[in-house]
Image (spheres, helix red, strand yellow):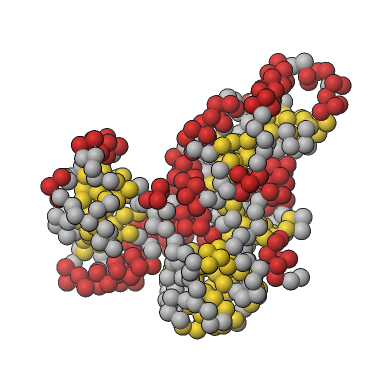
Amino acid sequence: MNIKEEMQKRRTFAIISHPDAGKTTLTEKFLLYGNLIRNAGTVKGKKSGKFATSDWMDIEKQRGISVTSSVMNFEYEGLHVNILDTPGHEDFSEDTYRTLTAVDSVIMIIDGTKGIEAQTLKLFKVCKMRGIPIFTFINKLDREGKDPFDLLKEIEDELDIQTYAMNWPVGMGKRFKGIFDRERDQFIRFTGNELEEAIAKEELQQQQDLIQTEEFQAAAEEIELLNEAGEAFDIEAVQQGELTPVYFGSALAPFGVETFFQSFIAMAPQPFPRKASGELIAPEQEAFSGFIFKIQANMNPAHRDRVAFVRVCSGKFERGMKVTLARTGKNIKIAQTQQFIASSRETLEEAYAGDIIGIYDPNVYRIGDTLVQGSDTYEYEELPQFPPELFKKVTVKNVMKSKQFRKGIEQLVQEGAIQLFRSLRSDEYIIGAVGQLQYDVFEYRMNNEYNVEIVFESIGERIPRWLKTEQVDKKLFDERSLLVKDREDNFLALFKNDFSLRWFQDKHPSIELIDLFEVN
Ligand code: G4P
């Protein structure tokens, strides 16, 4: 098979959701379809701890994070599916955001009993700013949840994206009868087990026991409303991330999951051309190229191994290949490679656009680096800086170690492990993160790699807003609008809460405040 055909088979996506919405349950079903696992319940037992096979850094062992499941891949109906994991809970970090730069589409799971929750909203914003196509699965229909129209409205209002219901639920919870598949014009009856009985629209008249039910009558009216609203399904709008196809179902039952997966995979985009040094690089071009979106440090404390995760953007990657690191122009032979399948890391021999590979990092790579076959040195666009939400002042416990402390911080900041800010008043170091995990990793590595003990002082959750000016009157800022500088010496204010942000805006309308989610 040639490079173009291989590339066209790739479907690379991430699943985003708030914890407990059903991501693990849904992912497991996908892996079953891909024959990657035989039984549900084997991907990770958060409670049973089945997946504690990771031998990566201690901190991950303690938390039971399964790094090996960062990327799962399998064949499905002639396609090569790559699913990238986006960790949630306290494992949430900037890596979670960066992972989204390496996918071609996203599945967003919403718990139908709860609607949109905080973490979904954050991850969604990243998808929106990158223009990534989003497919929505509204889960837990087997439970009494919110009204389907209200859910669609919530998505449209809160996420500012159009919706198109691909199917429509008939009842929910105990009264759940099934879904009407608008795509194929058929009803799928919920029988309480995994069997999904499809009934063509014309044959529904013969199912009087069903169509006479209150739930069916109500759903028929609702579908009528949807049809009358008459918005046509627009695949281009989906591809541009402006419209999300919405599917209802239950990951646990499972119900509507396989039809969802089939419909999604048929529409999910293959790798698209990506911008590098102002040009578009076609994924089917002969020469391999890719960029590093994540670096996993210290997997083996004895060797201080690091693995760089590369998203292949073009051509064919082969183990042993010589590539140029565009940032430095240095030639590197890539001999040690890994691919990540559900429960193991295997040596990888070749990969194509859309695939994710892990390469051994002898401490030369940085997040955002481009690797190119041959001597070309074009670079993929810089990964965006994501606004942190948590901020802590950090100091060294033993001042005699100040030098190592500064060196450690400098390197970890450069690596993208954390973000560094300097307070203007006291010149203190302030570390910004999007999740608690980043602090834990930071502390662990400062301890283990730089032999420095650090002390944190929390300044709580903050809302960062960059200032669109180089001249700043320091007197306008106080503890509720802490003025700091980022690494590039840009000013930003860390607002204590929404109230202090709005108060400041009202008081100083001439100072333009920038939300990073809006500009990237
Ligand atoms: P996550 O990865 O997004 O955090 O969610 P996960 O799949 O672990 O699901 C969270 C909980 O929701 C689990 O229950 C799971 O069984 C349940 N769940 C997932 N999909 C559905 C669904 O379609 N319907 C219903 N009713 N429940 C669903 P748990 O009791 O917290 O965990 P477990 O002991 O079952 O693993």
Image side of residue 12 versus residue 496, left or right: right
Residue 48 pos. (x, y %): 56, 48
Residue visible at 39% across and 57% down? 385
Residue 411 is at least partly visible in this image: yes
Above or below, comparing residue 63 to residue 165 in the picture: below
Residue 214, compared with residue 148, is above or below; it is above
Q: Nearer the viewer, residue 181 or 338?
A: 181
Residue 409: which quarter of the image? bottom left
The image shows residue 452 at horizontal and vertical percentages of 26, 68
Quadrant location of the N terminus in the rendered image: bottom right
Instruction: Count all numbered tags in the image, as a single digit.
Output: 0
Quick one: which residue is furthest to the left in this view? 475
Q: Is residue 371 left or right of residue 432?
A: right
Q: Is residue 52 visible?
A: no
Residue 207, by quadrant, is top right
**Residue at (61% x, 69% y) in the render:** 314
User: Against 161, is 269 above or below?
Assistant: below
Query: Considering depth in this image, is 268 or 22 the residue closer to the camera?
Result: 268
Query: Residue 103 in the image: x percent, y percent?
Result: 57, 57
Residue at screen point 72% across, 26% down: 177
Q: Where's residue 292, x and y in %?
A: 49, 67
Q: Nearer the viewer, residue 227 or 198?
A: 227
Residue ID at (81%, 34%): 198
> Depth check: 133 or 300 in front?
133
